[in-house]
Amino acid sequence: MATSIREKQTAALRRMLNFNVPPLKNTVTEPVWKVLIYDRFGQDIISPLLAVKELRDMGITLHLLLHSDRDSIPDVPAIYFVMPTEENIDRICQDLRNQLYESYYLNFISAISRSKLEDIASAALGANAVTQVTKVFDQYLNFITLEDDMFVLCNQNKELISYHAINKPDIMDTDMEAIMDTIVDSLFCFFVTLGAVPIIRCPRGNAAEMVAVKLDKKLRENLRDARNSLFTGDTMGAGQFSFQRPLIVLADRNLDLATPLHHSWTYQALIHDVLDFHLNRVTLEEGAGSEALPAGARPKKKNKRIYDLTAADKFWQKHKGSPFPEVAESVQQELDTYRAQEDEVKRLKSIMGLEGEDEGAISMLSDNTAKLTSAVSSLPELLEKKRLIDLHTNVATAVLDHIKTRKLDLYFEYEEKLMSKSTLDKSLLDIISDPDAGTPEDKIRLFLIFYITSQQPPSEADLDQYKKALMDAGCDLSPLSYIKQWNEINVHKACIELLCSPSSLFSMVMNTGSQFVMEGVKNLVLKQHVSISVHTVSSSSETDDYRYFDPKMLRGRGNYIEYQNLVDYAKAKQGKRVLYGCSELFNAAQFVKQLSQLGQK
């Protein structure tokens, strides 16, 4: 694949925003000003890929939600980017009747049915707006790309295809079919955008097999219609039928429930675990201050800071998969470098006697001031560097606060030992009973990992003792109830042994952390283990029984720990490229909540 999935989806969006005409490169032309109308699904797809400034550069003067109150702008074309739902179609028909815009370019995230297309045609005919509906396109962009090699199938209404939705005991066959159809539609859109027909592998007898069968059928039906196939012609990239076709490995979340509960130690996964991290955007709450409030006064609202962690952020791209102490040290180094550059500019100004002078005076100096003018010309770059340093200082400090107050380094270290069958230097009961070590959620996560990775479940007497300690610590035991049921039904001994096997492939030793930032936090060796996802991609004997469809990524509920494992695996295997995809991206707290809901049924 010549380009990443992020680049391909971004290119498709840019083409759509240019009235479905590929933008001309290296040309300086005034853009056509237009309005972008999207629903929540469209907003989620666009926001991780295109910033507001980029939208403006493409002529988007306004970007509005479809179901918001919108005024008429009769002399401006409107580009719609929405799902083809009944509610959205009705609102588009209402816009046509109200003559809101000069012309309408209708782009549907997934394929629109013929009946809904006829509804739009009828509304346009009734409103005398047939000529104003300029183009109608199926974009096949029903997935969200978060990284060059990572995507998620949906964000809106994700509870409808969640782990809880699929595994609840009272699910109806019709509901399961609807969930599978939703997942398959997004996977199909992914491959249309990728421009390749995959080879499909999956284990037998679970939801992954259901998805594989439906996806294979959908791909075959599209390929059978040669005239209208989405995998032939000018729209596809070269080599879709080459010897380098992608392999999609569909995996069920039930193969590995320990990894999404694991306390991580890498930067990106920690942010997702302990902060509000959503579609590459992290939100931090600032304290309102420690001053006492007058009696009866309302508490002050907490201010919120929002930071975008984008592909343009070089520090983020370099360190998002790094152990946290290494990140803290790198932030400190970047800050020291910036201060040295800033001091150099001040020193040169002082030597030249230009303190407080304007840029015009500086530019008129002789050649002897070349250093100063060079330093001043680099000020915009220096300011951007300072902005990123401030961003990561604030984010890393917020993460560090959680590490210290919850003793997350202790939990990470203990879970690593559980999963690698190493000698434990402290009893599990001691950690659960320690009021200063973690939240109730941290404690139940730790115990669930212990229960899942144990070769033999604890005896009833021991289990009662653990349950009492967990209840005394304020833990909800509903997730344990479900895990016990899951363990009885799915005795995956081979998978458990695999999960507990340390891999030298992923072992790395962390550098000593900055004492300025990391005081009181352990410098731990990051021994990542072969999760089910990595082993499935790399093993042949373990996948011999997998079903094979011929009409790399994974299907299931995902997390950044597995994603980072696959990134590290791909780095070690030169010439191989691995993409990680999931139907739902959740952190441990969200997963524990779903397990709790299942345990209460």
Image: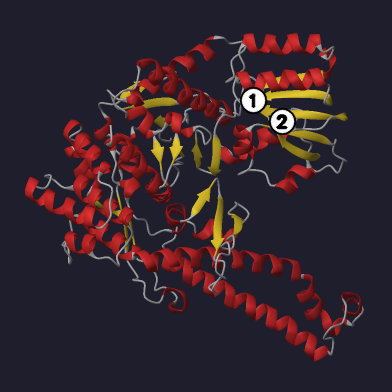
Q: Residue at x 74, y 87 (%)?
A: 347
Residue 8 in sight in this render? no
Residue 102 located left or right of residue 298: right
**C-beta proximity under 8 Å, tags 1 and 2:** yes
Give the amino acid at mark 2.
Met
Residue found 67% across the figure and 36% down from its top: 11
Few, some or many C-alpha atoms within 10 Å of disc 1 (few <14, some 14-19, many ≥20)?
A: many
**Left or right: where 245 falls relative to 462:** right
Which numbered tag is attached to residue 495? Answer: none
Determine the secondary structure under disc 2. Answer: helix
Q: Is 81 left, or right, of 174 in this rendering?
A: right
Say which mark, if any, is on residue 16: 2
**Residue at left 78%, top 80%?**
371
Above or below: residue 462 compared with residue 596: below
Front position in the image: 121 or 598: 598
User: Image height check: is 181 above or below 122?
Assistant: below
Quarter residue 346 falls in? bottom right
Question: For residue 369, which quarter of the picture?
Answer: bottom right
Question: Badge 1 is on which residue?
Answer: 139
Mark closest to the chain's N terminus, 1 or 2: 2
Above or below, comparing residue 412 to residue 531 in the picture:
below
